[in-house]
Image (cartoon, rainbow, N blue to C red):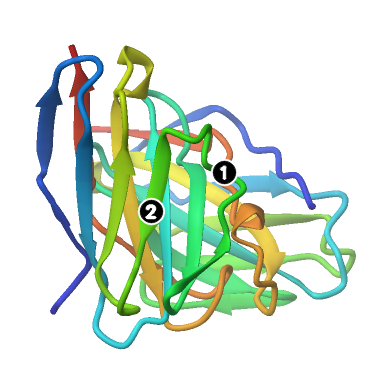
Amino acid sequence: LAKTTQPISMDSYEGQEVNITCSHNNIATNDYITWYQQFPSQGPRFIIQGYKTKVTNEVASLFIPADRKSSTLSLPRVSLSDTAVYYCLVGDIRDNYGQNFVFGPGTRLSVLP
Amino acid sequence: GAGVSQTPSNKVTEKGKYVELRCDPISGHTALYWYRQSLGQGPEFLIYFQGTGAADDSGLPNDRFFAVRPEGSVSTLKIQRTERGDSAVYLCASSHQGPHTEAFFGQGTRLTVV
């Protein structure tokens, strides 16, 4: 079971690019990397998922180096509404064991005006 | 429906009472998960269903907790003899396939045991 490590908190200002790095040194060959966002009083929301190199969607980009032992979630030009907790998860999408669908404490991002 | 629906949104109960929390997943999603979340913590896995069966219930903390999904859609989380330590937000999620595919979460049920 790949364990992830993220910074507990980060601060940024509106309009800046924010990069949140997640370490997963024990990632397995078939594991994917997934990021979720959670606002207060809401359930987590899927942001992006990737296996290697770079993935981009309308919300964020995910950078994964060749060794896959870390990944970086990049949020371009953040706004106050991006203030949330961001979770990095690692697991095999073919896995049928829910206990491997594990959330850590996440990174609390505060965007300041 | 448009998303995962959980009812009630808030539940206050007395210590020792029985409670049921309901989850309506997205139509067609075979996978369903229950989590609970305490303030300042990440969601804690409780149980995972594939269809009607519990594929993984290893996260249920003790035998006071039980969950069912009899027809493979709606699920009910049941807590017997509630304790103050059970107070948390209970989250339900569903996905088209198994864990680590895109999961959609409900708003949660805030359970307070007094």
Q: Earlier in the sequence, mark 1 or mark 2?
A: 1
Left or right of B40 in this view: B97 = right
Q: Nearer the viewer, mark 1 or mark 2?
A: 2
Q: Residue at x 26, y 71 (%)?
A: B25
* Quadrant placement of the C terminus of chain A: top left
Residue B59 bears which disc, if any? 1
Query: Looking at the image, is B44 positioned above or below residue A45?
Result: above
How many numbered badges does the structure rendering display? 2
- Residue A29 in the image: x percent, y percent? 87, 72
Between B34 and B102, the residue placed more toward the observer is B34
Q: Are marks 1 and 2 on the same chain?
A: yes
Q: Which residue is mark 2?
A: B67
Q: Going by the picture, which residue comes out furthest to the bottom?
A: B28
How packed mark 2 is, by other alpha carbons closer than 10 Å (few <14, some 14-19, many 20 or more), is many
Query: Looking at the image, is A41 positioned above or below residue A59?
Result: above
Left or right of A40 in this view: B41 = right
- Residue A84 in the image: x percent, y percent? 34, 41
Q: Secondary structure at mark 2?
A: strand
The answer to whether one can see residue B42 in this image is yes
